[in-house]
Every structure is written in C-alpha cells, then in structure tokens.
Image (cartoon, rainbow, N blue to C red):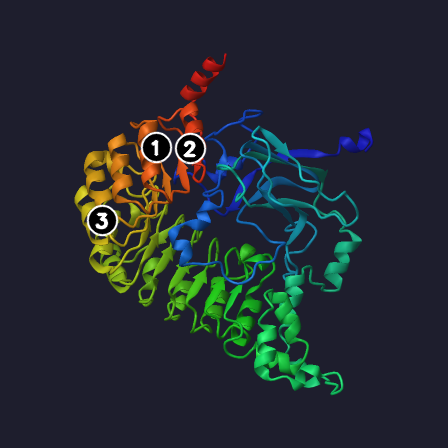
C-alpha cells in the first residue's frame, strides 16, 4: 500500500451497541455490561478482570451440565460451520470498506468465531428486501490463547471490487473453551471511507439486477416451496431403485438426514421422498438458529403450514434480526404448530404480547425460552399454557402487567406445573420490592414441584419468612438454586440460612452464592458436606470467613463436585494451588484479590 493510500484509511471505535445476546452486569449499571464496548479502550495493555469491560453471562462447558439441561436438550442439528453461543452487534459512525479489525481483550481472550458485516444503508437499497443484509467475512474456531492482554486481528478479505461498505458489524463468540469470563474492552474498525452516492460495484449491481439470493439457506428455503414441481417429476423405472423398497425402509434411511439443507434437497428428488418427508412424524424437531440472518417471515409461515405441522420442538433463537420476521409473521408461524412442546426464542425481537397470544394456542407446550427478549410483553399472555414446566425470562428488557397484582396471581395459579423458573436480572417493575416477594409466595402457594429457580441479581427484597416457606415446600425437590448477587443472607443472618437450607435440600446439585455479601464459616461447609452430598457445582465468588480447611471438608464430603469458584474469596493463591492438586476431578476457579496478588509477589521477591 502506498503512502497516499494509507492516508485514506480510517480508524474508528464503536459508536453504538445495537444488539447483544447476554451480559453479566446488572440493570442500570456500567459494571460488566455490554454497553462497555462503546468507545476506545479504557484498559490498554492492562491484563486482568476489569468492571469496565463487556462480559457475557456464561463461559466454559459446565453451563451445559446444569440440572435443567437434562430437561432442555439441544434441538435438532447444528451445522459445524455454526458454533456461535453469544454475539454483539455494533455500529460505527462512518461506513467503510473494512480492511482490518482489532479486538482489545483484557481477560481470557480467544472466543471470536465469526465476523459478519451488513450492507444496510450503503450500497444496497432498502427496498431490495429479498437480499440478506448480513454477510460472513471471517470464520474461525474458538481457541485458548495465553493469559495476557491481547489485540486480536482476524484476517479479513483483501479490499477489491467485490468489497462491501459497512458501518455495522456482528461479532459472534463461543467461550466454551475459556478458563474464565471472557472480557472485551473495545473493537476498532479500519477501512477505506465510503461516501453516500458512491457508485455501487459491478458485483453488487448484479445482485440487485438478477434478484440473486446471497445465502444457501435462503435458496434452500425458497426451494422448499415445491408443490407445483411434483407433477413434473419424471421417474425412470429402470433407475428408480427405491421404488422397490418398503416405505418403512425409505423412511428409516431418510431419518439419518440431520441438516435442514439435506432434508430439503431430498424432498426435491422425487414425489416419493416428498411425501415421506412431509408426512406426520418425520420432522419432529428443528433448529433454525443457524439461518437467523436469512430466514424471513414469509419463509417461516410457508414452512410452518407445509412442513412443520408435526413439530414438537422448534428453536427460533436469534431469528428476526432487522425485523425480517415481525411479531405477526412469528405468530402466524406458530399457530400452525398444535403439537409443539418446546419453543426457544432467545434474543428474538418479535417476542411481544401479540406473539405470546399465538404461542398460548400451543396447548402442549412444556418449555418456553424467552431469554433476553428486547421488546416489551405481557407475561400474563401465558396463562393458557397449563402444561408449562420450564420458563426462562432472564434478562428480558421490559415485562409488563395489566392489573399487575391480580393478574400475576392468576398467572402462577395457571402455571401450577412449573418446575424450572429462570428470572435472573430481568428488567421489570414486577421484580422489585414487594412484587418479587409476592411472586415467590405465589410459586410456593400454587406450584406443585419446583426443581430449580434462578433469582440471580434479583432477590434483594425477600424476607426470611417467605424464603423459609419456599425452601420448606420445595427443598426436597430442589436441584438448582441461584441467588447470586443478592443481599438475601445479609438481611437475616447467614447462620439461620445454613441451618434451614442445608438440612432441607438433600438433592441439591447446583448452588450459586455469587457475591452474596455474607460470611460463610468452615462449620457451614461441614453442614454442606453432611446434608448436600449430591452437590456438583458451587459458586462462592466473593465469599468471606472460611479457610482452606473448610473447603477441603466440603470437597471430601461432596465427592461429585466438578466445579467450584473461589475467586475473590478468603482463599489465597497458594491455598488454591494446593486444592487444585488434591482435588484433580474438580475444576476449581480462582481469580485472586489484589491483596493476595501483592502478598504472592512479596513472597516471590
């Protein structure tokens, strides 16, 4: 590149965060929130855990081993080319032809797996709705990189006539290989400036003129509209070997097809295959998340009416980006699915009261995942779902209620079969002060058997009596309990909590006491080892008051323990090292406090 060309290159940091999949931080805070990605780096060349970074809610593989994961297994087939678990969508002030991208990673780097750009508002007119607005420009595998400050630059395509100008990026991550929470400080975009009115490249002109679909999923979905093609299928008897096989054998062979693309291609082969693929019982579960950038509302409605009638499990997570699936489209799609038992709609913008009214017609529904729905909706629309057993409304932005208290009680009376209730860090007036306490009371009054609850960053207004009644009724069935980042124990004393809690929950497998602002003694851990022998995962981040001896007693008693977070606790670096050596089957996490780091440095010097 010549010196003249170098002056044309523009460098800029994120101007706005438009969408994100999850965040560790709390509502109305800048600590560990997704919005921290906006602007230049705040911790340049400073490796460590910083509250000013973007942090996703999960990391590692142990999240897939939580007790409720046995109840909500992954749906359908996910292609190897799509391994994303989190994302951020970011926007820059000026559109450019990208030449370089730099991720400033302050802690546990290495999770980036895909980079997509959008041609929205640059060279592709808004009226060309048939064109996908997202294009993958880089794909890689998640890697474990060295524990040091890192500026990662994925190798982008060279600038050419086929380049697309953009000011919107979508970065996708998979942090399942990460040792701890992956922290991202800033993202810098570098490229040649684009100006409004710039002549579109010949490549883009062809896309518009020929009405060419830009992705294989879109082509595949369009090709599924094949009713008129069956009459023109020509079968050559001498080559139609499958005609001599019983239908049951053909069905068994076709059932080995996992990818939706393969199923679509098989349906196009002949009328015999088409009939089998569209018959009852062939396609019972489907994962459309990998096609989120190109699945349109019309496609969803057509597929639902023609192919999805017998679905029992459907994953629509991430779909509907840029409003290519509206609430009306999604509602029309699910109304044709009377047998649906499991519906996942994580990060879906079309989730609304109107959509949930349509979902309520799926009377067999047992699982509903609405994690991080960004649009307002009235949860009471779910009253007709009397068979619902799993409900995740964690990190939803704005749940609303009409006649709040009276309808709230009616809701939980209808959902008496609920077993798993996840409401961690939900932004809503229904989960503050007396309202949240009323919800816990209603769960205790109406639900038959609660197996797991997620009250993460939620239960700051729960009195001892309400909590005691909840544990007394559901303690025997409770497998999963998350009260991280709450002041529950601080309000009425930890000693009383341990006496009631550990003796009432013998089957507990997961417990999160993250940053609960309460002391835990060695005697408390002895009670755990004695009363909760099935405990497998325990998060004690930020806890105080215990010694390494208490942890040793805990791990010797809870022999199935596979995960223990001792970060920022009273355990120092040397004690953590000894614990890891003694209990090799347990993944012990330990991010030391600054005091322990200073002590360790002094000792080594």
Residue 384, position as x, y percentages in the image: 32, 68
Find the residue positioned furthest to the top.
Answer: 605
Are dots 2 and 1 in contact, CB under 8 Å?
A: yes
Quarter-of-image position of residue 511: top left
Judged from the image, the secondary structure of the residue bearing numbered disc 1 is helix
Q: Residues within 10 Å of mark 3 (few under 14, many from 20)?
A: some
Residue 394 shown left or right of residue 20 in the figure: left
Q: Which mark is residue 471?
A: 3
Q: Which mark is residue 552?
A: 1
Find the residue positioned furthest to the left.
Answer: 465
Q: Residue at x 66, y 50 (%)?
A: 136
Q: Which residue is mark 2?
A: 582
Residue 354, position as x, y percentages in the image: 41, 64
Residue 412, position as x, y percentages in the image: 26, 59
Query: Disc 2 and disc 3: Cα gap in Å?
Result: 34 Å
Quarter-of-image position of residue 448: bottom left
Find the residue positioned furthest to the right.
Answer: 2
């Amino acid at each position: 590149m010549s010196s003249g060309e170098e002056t044309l290159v523009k460098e800029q940091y994120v101007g706005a965060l438009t969408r994100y999949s999850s965040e560790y931080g709390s509502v109305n805070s800048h600590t560990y929130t997704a919005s921290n990605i906006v602007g230049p780096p705040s911790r340049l060349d400073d490796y460590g855990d910083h509250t000013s970074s973007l942090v996703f809610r999960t990391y590692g593989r142990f999240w897939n081993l939580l007790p409720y994961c046995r109840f909500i297994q992954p749906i359908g087939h996910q292609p190897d080319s799509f391994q994303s678990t989190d994302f951020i969508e970011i926007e820059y002030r000026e559109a450019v032809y990208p030449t370089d991208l730099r991720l400033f990673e302050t802690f546990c780097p290495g999770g980036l797996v895909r980079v997509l750009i959008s041609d929205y508002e640059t060279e592709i007119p808004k009226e060309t709705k048939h064109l996908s607005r997202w294009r993958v420009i880089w794909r890689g595998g998640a890697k474990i990189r060295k524990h040091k400050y890192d500026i990662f630059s994925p190798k982008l395509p060279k600038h050419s006539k086929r380049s697309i100008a953009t000011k919107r990026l979508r970065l996708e991550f998979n942090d399942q290989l990460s040792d701890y929470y992956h922290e991202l400080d800033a993202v810098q975009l570098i490229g040649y400036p684009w100006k409004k009115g710039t002549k579109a490249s010949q490549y883009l002109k062809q896309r518009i003129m020929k009405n060419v679909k830009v992705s294989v999923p879109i082509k595949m979905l369009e090709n599924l509209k094949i009713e008129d093609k069956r009459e023109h299928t020509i079968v050559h008897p001498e080559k139609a070997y499958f005609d001599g096989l019983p239908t049951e054998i053909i069905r068994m062979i076709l059932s080995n097809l996992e990818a939706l693309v393969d199923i679509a291609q098989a349906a196009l082969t002949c009328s015999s295959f088409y009939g089998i693929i569209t018959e009852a019982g062939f396609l019972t579960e489907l994962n459309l998340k990998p096609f989120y950038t190109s699945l349109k509302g019309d496609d969803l409605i057509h597929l639902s009416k023609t192919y999805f009638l017998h679905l029992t499990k459907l994953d629509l997570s991430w779909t509907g980006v840029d409003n290519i699936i509206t609430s009306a489209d999604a509602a029309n799609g699910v109304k044709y699915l009377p047998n649906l038992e499991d519906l996942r709609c994580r990060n879906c913008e079309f989730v609304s009261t109107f959509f949930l009214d349509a979902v309520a017609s799926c009377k067999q529904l047992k699982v509903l995942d609405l994690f991080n729905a960004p649009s307002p909706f009235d949860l009471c629309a779910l009253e007709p779902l009397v068979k619902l057993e799993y409900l995740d409304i964690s990190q939803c932005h704005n749940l609303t209620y009409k006649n709040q208290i009276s309808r709230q009680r009616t809701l939980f009376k209808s959902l008496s079969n609920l077993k798993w209730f996840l409401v961690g860090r939900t932004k809503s007036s229904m989960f503050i002060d007396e309202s949240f306490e009323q919800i816990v009371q209603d769960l205790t009054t109406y639900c038959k058997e609660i197996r797991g609850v997620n009250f993460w960053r939620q239960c700051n207004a729960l009195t001892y009596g309400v909590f005691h009644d909840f544990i007394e009724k559901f303690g025997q069935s409770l497998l999963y309990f998350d009260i991280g980042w709450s002041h529950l124990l601080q309000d009425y004393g930890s000693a009383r909590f341990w006496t009631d809690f550990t003796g009432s929950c013998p089957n507990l497998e997961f417990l999160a006491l993250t940053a609960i602002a309460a002391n835990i003694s060695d005697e408390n851990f002895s009670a755990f080892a004695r009363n909760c022998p099935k405990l497998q995962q325990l998060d004690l981040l930020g806890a105080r008051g215990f010694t390494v001896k208490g942890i040793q007693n805990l791990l010797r008693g809870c022999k199935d323990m596979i995960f223990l977070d001792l970060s920022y606790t009273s355990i120092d670096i040397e004690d953590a090292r000894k614990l890891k050596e003694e209990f090799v089957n347990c993944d012990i996490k330990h991010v030391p406090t600054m005091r322990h780091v200073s002590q360790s440095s002094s000792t080594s010097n």
